[in-house]
Image (cartoon, rainbow, N blue to C red):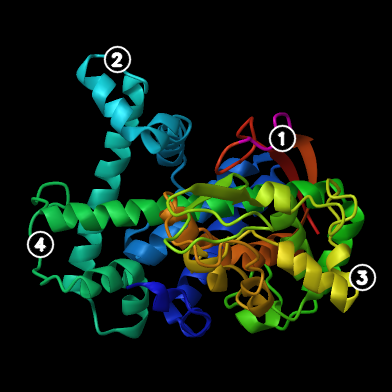
């Protein structure tokens, strides 16, 4: 239904993606960091990374003219993150025992605090409003190429057309025209993708910046590589190098891969249900149908036989290994999951170098039922911009740690910093 808009060919040729990327980097992120650098003011970069992720994913879903602009709108950003983390920190009972939760609710026994429902209501209302704005954009889309690129809600448009929903031009404020059941279904799908795209990219960018800040020699080598781009991404740039050019930078790719290995944004269990035909997993006896099994990137990425000194962040392992060693590392690399529920956004994530990533399907090739579909479907949506964000930031700035209290990764399905913060100083390079 929507997999084609995450294909490598679509992404690399999309004028919408190009305009979104240019706006996020040149008009929003780099000016913010430059102001902080000039004022010698540290930046709480974890919050900014989530803002960048949300602005990009919301632009792709709903159109650049309807996006969140959390980079610039700090109060709205913090309100949303307050709602969101209230919601995500209390998902266990809803996901694992939904029937029990509903039953106990009927007797006044609430396993989930009431303020979680309030946060859900706020987020759902906000997403529904974005859907209505996207519908309005589609109804009045300009023929002007520039305007169209800014206004086209790529994912929303694809989903509505796939569902074959007749389009009528809405009237009145977006908050006031009524929502049909199909509108609510569409908004629910958009919320799933929005959350998956924000979580994964925000977490990965934070740990990438943290590790580069702890390793100034790698940071310096990376900057030397990044400035070789033509054109390089400078503060006064008006255009960006093509995505294919970033794919030719080996150290940049190694930094991304090593961060995804050590700090997978989805380190938690990836449940599957065994199919009708008995299957054997990792040498086990045949398993009957309907059995819940799982693996997790956290464990797979820490096999010391494959990744020596697995707790060490070492991008050089991806550069200095033999072909046989790299092939084995890719067999165990599971940041994008695998099989029938593999992340369809992995092309968006790496743009190049993704053939080897797709070949990393080591377990569960034929187990197609998973309760966490949205994350496996959209896990890498925002990571399409990972190389661009890293290139833009580290071409222009060097970073040092000011406060990394609580940087240890949470032990949960999507694991960001326990303290929800990372403060860095940015100095012009």
Q: Which of marks 4 and 2 is nearer the N terminus?
A: 2
Q: Is residue 46 above or below residue 162?
A: above
Q: In the image, is residue 409 part of the stretch drawn in magenta?
A: yes
Asked which secondary structure carries label 3, the reply is: helix
Disc 1 to disc 3: CB gap under 8 Å: no
Measured as percent of width and height from the top left, residue 391 is found at 70, 66
What's the CA distance linking mark 4 and mark 2? 41 Å
Q: Quadrant of the C terminus?
A: bottom right
Q: Which of marks 4 and 3 is nearer the N terminus?
A: 4
Asked which secondary structure carries label 1, the reply is: loop
Foreground disc of the pair 2, 1: 2
Q: Earlier in the sequence, mark 1 or mark 3?
A: 3
Q: Which residue is drawn at 88% across and 59% down?
A: 218
Q: Residue at x 29, y 66 (%)?
A: 156
Residue denoted by label 3: 320
**Which label belongs to residue 109?**
2
Q: In this view, does 42 lie above or below 175?
A: above
Q: Which of marks 2 and 1 is nearer the N terminus?
A: 2
Measured as percent of width and height from the top left, residue 367 is found at 49, 61
Foreground disc of the pair 4, 3: 3
Disc 4 to disc 2: CB gap under 8 Å: no
What is the magenta range? 404-411
Assign the magenta stretch its main secondary structure: loop
From the viewer's side, name the closer residue of 225 and 92.
92
Residue denoted by label 1: 408
Disc 4 to disc 3: CB gap under 8 Å: no
Measured as percent of width and height from the top left, residue 107 is found at 22, 15
Q: For residue 331, which quarter of the picture?
A: bottom right
Q: In the image, is residue 209 part of the stretch drawn in magenta?
A: no
Residue denoted by label 4: 170
**Which label belongs to residue 157?**
none
């Amino acid at each position: 239904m929507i997999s084609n808009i995450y294909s490598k060919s679509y992404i690399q040729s999309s004028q919408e993606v190009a305009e979104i990327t240019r706006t996020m980097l040149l008009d929003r992120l780099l000016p913010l960091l430059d102001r902080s650098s000039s004022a010698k003011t540290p930046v709480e970069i974890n919050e900014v990374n989530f803002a960048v992720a949300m602005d990009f994913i919301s632009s792709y879903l709903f159109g650049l003219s309807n996006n969140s602009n959390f980079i610039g709108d700090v109060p709205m950003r913090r309100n949303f993150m307050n709602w969101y983390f209230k919601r995500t920190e209390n998902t266990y009972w809803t996901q694992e025992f939904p029937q029990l939760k509903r039953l106990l609710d009927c007797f006044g026994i609430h396993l989930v605090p009431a303020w979680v429902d309030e946060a859900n209501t706020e987020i759902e209302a906000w997403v529904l409003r974005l859907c209505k704005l996207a519908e309005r954009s589609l109804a009045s889309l300009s023929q002007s190429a520039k305007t169209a690129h800014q206004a086209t809600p790529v994912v929303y448009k694809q989903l509505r057309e796939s569902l074959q929903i007749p389009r009528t031009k809405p009237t009145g404020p977006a908050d006031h025209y009524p929502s049909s059941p199909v509108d609510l279904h569409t908004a629910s799908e958009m919320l799933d993708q929005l959350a998956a795209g924000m979580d994964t990219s925000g977490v990965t960018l934070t740990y990438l910046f943290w590790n580069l800040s702890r390793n100034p020699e790698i940071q310096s080598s990376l900057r030397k590589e990044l400035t070789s781009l033509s054109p390089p991404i400078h503060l006064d740039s008006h255009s960006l190098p093509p995505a294919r050019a970033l794919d030719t930078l080996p150290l940049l790719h190694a930094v991304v891969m090593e961060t995804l290995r050590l700090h997978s944004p989805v380190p938690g269990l990836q449940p599957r249900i065994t199919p009708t035909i008995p299957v054997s997993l990792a040498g086990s006896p045949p398993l009957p149908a309907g059995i819940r099994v799982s693996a997790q990137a956290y464990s797979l990425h820490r096999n010391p036989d494959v990744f020596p000194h697995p707790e060490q962040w070492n991008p050089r392992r991806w550069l200095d290994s033999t072909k046989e060693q790299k092939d084995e590392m890719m067999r165990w690399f599971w940041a994008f999951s695998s099989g029938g529920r593999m992340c369809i956004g992995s092309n968006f994530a790496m743009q190049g170098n993704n053939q080897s990533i797709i070949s990393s399907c080591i377990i569960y090739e034929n187990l197609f039922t998973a309760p966490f579909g949205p994350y496996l479907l959209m896990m890498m949506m925002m990571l399409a911009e990972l190389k661009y964000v890293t290139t833009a930031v580290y071409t222009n700035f060097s970073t040092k740690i000011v406060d990394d209290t609580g940087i240890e990764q949470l032990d949960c399905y999507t694991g960001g910093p326990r303290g929800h913060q990372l403060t860095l100083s940015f100095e012009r390079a």
